[in-house]
Amino acid sequence: MEKHGVTFRDYACAGANLAAGMSVEQVCKVLGIEEPLWAEVQEFWNNNMASMSMDDMKFYGEVFTNPKQGKFANAEGAVGGVEDVLKKYPEWSDFLKMQAYSTEASEVGIEIDFEKEFGITVTEYAQLGGHWSAYYKEKVLDVENFDSYAFEEEGGPAITPEQEERYRVFHLQTELMDKWSAYYKEKFKDASVDLSDDIDF
């Protein structure tokens, strides 16, 4: 199934590259369609989203962390892979700071402009999120649990190097998130939006 020669996966890649800052003109050039047809392609695939397979929907969910694939793999102006973003922000702490910033800002009704604040697009932020989520899964979630209290006690049971690393990574995340959340809570404490102003009783 396709619309004007655009398959669902083409459409997903196009949407991901648009979110990353590529213009509609560039997207249409890559897809080989005239710009006025893009609206019809969007409407068609939006209306047929429910009929897509689980694999297609999984692809749609993941393509925003790696839009540079399919017809957009080597397209001029296409967003790069996560490796490009990691050159700007190579540390896990960089992402956790952004995450805390975004979370605390949204709590008071502020939408973060990632390009202005950090010099990256929302898509690139999502790429960092995917990268560090995979890191956390490997280092913490996929490692057999152990009694952290026993680990802290002298003479506690022996643990594997993987479990020791699990303990370190888990507590590092907690420490950094607590630090940055507290910092941004303080930063935004006077910026709270009074939503009642928009409500008529």
Image (cartoon, rainbow, N blue to C red):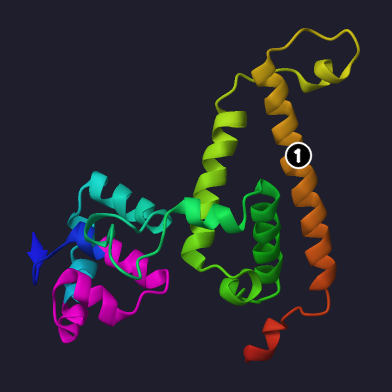
Question: Helix or strand or loop: what does disc 1 sit on?
Answer: helix
23, above or below 53, in the image: below
Q: Residue at x 72, y 42 (%)?
A: 173
- In the image as oriented, which residue stretches furthest toward the right? 154
**Label 1 environment density (alpha carbons within 10 Å; few <14, some 14–19, many ≥20):** some
State the image quarter where residue 163 is shown.
Answer: top right
Q: Which residues are magenta?
A: 12-40
Counting from the top left corner in percent of width and height, residue 35 is at 19, 84
The quadrant in which the N terminus is found is bottom left
Counting from the top left corner in percent of width and height, residue 29 is at 20, 76
53, above or below 23, in the image: above
Counting from the top left corner in percent of width and height, residue 125 is at 54, 60
State the image quarter where residue 152 is shown.
Answer: top right
Q: Does residue 52 belong to the magenta stretch?
A: no
**Residue wearing tag 1:** 172
2, above or below 187, in the image: above
Q: How many marks?
A: 1
Q: Does residue 33 belong to the magenta stretch?
A: yes
